[in-house]
């Protein structure tokens, strides 16, 4: 892809802790990065400024993944300057409760953002990507989607659904030189992990006895977005310090 116009990458949930590190890494790798936010547009805009100051190319875009009308308008705008060829579906939320005490709203809300949101943003980007005959789709799941997790039936269901959809999409796109893979992080240092897992609990749970870092996840995404990963598709790659 050298010598060509910059490849466009979109990172959903790019204003969050993990998404922002992934977006910064892709910008460092030379992509034109579009950083998606919903409620945190100022954070996305700050990251854009930081990337530009470092010589990278980035833009912020704001829409609700569950609002199909607003999302379609923004996707149309995004595609005016060319197809997205690297898509990182990172957006997701959790709202934890044991299933016996889980409300319909908790179930629907998490499925809507974490699974339906993946479809809503990915589907309209596919034909333009297919026409280029090159692309990378990287979906961020979770160890919960692979082995389950107490209190997260909704989140685990969404992430397991994402894995199933990714494997199918990989089969559908393989002949077009478009790969589709899943990254399934375990305990990653940051706001969510810090509030949920005390250090002693992490040492008990994780064979490597530490939380992972967002940069370690971003480095894996960077590899999967590159030419080096061109024969890897339909895979779920766990990054969890040996939990499974």
Image: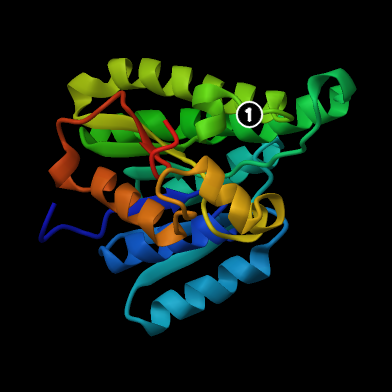
Q: Is residue 18 left or right of residue 43?
A: left
The residue lying at 55 percent from left, 44 percent from top is 204
Q: Nearer the viewer, residue 62 or 90?
A: 90
Q: Nearer the viewer, residue 129 or 220?
A: 220
Q: Position of residue 80 (x, y in %)?
A: 43, 49
- Mark 1, other Cα within 10 Å: few <14 / some 14–19 / many ≥20: some
Residue 212 picture quarter = bottom left
The residue lying at 62 percent from left, 69 percent from top is 43
The residue lying at 70 percent from left, 23 percent from top is 153
Q: In the rendered view, would you say 223 is above or below 174? A: below
Residue 213 picture quarter = bottom left
Residue 33 picture quarter = bottom left
Q: Is residue 155 left or right of residue 240?
A: right
Q: Position of residue 215 (x, y in %)?
A: 40, 61
Instruction: Please give the residue where the numbered disc 1 appears in the rendered image.
Output: 149
Q: Is residue 164 left or right of residue 220?
A: right
The residue lying at 48 percent from left, 33 percent from top is 122
């Amino acid at each position: 892809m050298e010598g060509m116009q910059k490849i466009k990458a979109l990172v959903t949930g790019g204003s969050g802790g993990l998404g922002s590190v992934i977006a910064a890494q892709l910008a460092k790798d030379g992509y034109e990065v579009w950083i998606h936010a919903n409620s945190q547009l100022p954070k996305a805009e700050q990251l854009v400024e930081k990337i530009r100051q470092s010589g990278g190319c980035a833009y912020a875009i704001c829409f609700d993944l569950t609002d199909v009308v607003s999302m379609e308008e923004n996707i149309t705008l995004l595609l005016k300057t060319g197809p997205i060829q690297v898509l990182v579906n990172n957006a997701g939320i959790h709202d934890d409760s044991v299933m016996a005490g889980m409300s319909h709203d908790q179930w629907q809300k998490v499925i809507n953002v974490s699974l339906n949101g993946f479809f809503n943003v990915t589907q309209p980007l596919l034909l333009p990507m297919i026409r280029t005959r090159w692309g990378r789709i990287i979906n961020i799941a979770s160890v919960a989607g692979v082995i389950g997790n107490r209190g997260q039936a909704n989140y685990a269901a969404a992430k397991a659904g994402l894995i199933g959809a990714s494997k199918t999409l990989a089969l559908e796109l393989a002949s077009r030189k478009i790969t589709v893979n899943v990254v399934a992080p375990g305990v990653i240092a940051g706001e969510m992990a810090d509030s949920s897992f005390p250090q002693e609990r992490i040492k008990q749970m994780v064979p490597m006895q530490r939380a992972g870092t967002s940069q370690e996840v971003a480095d894996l995404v960077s590899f999967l977005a590159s030419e080096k990963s061109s024969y890897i598709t339909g895979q779920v790659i766990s990054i969890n310090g040996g939990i499974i």
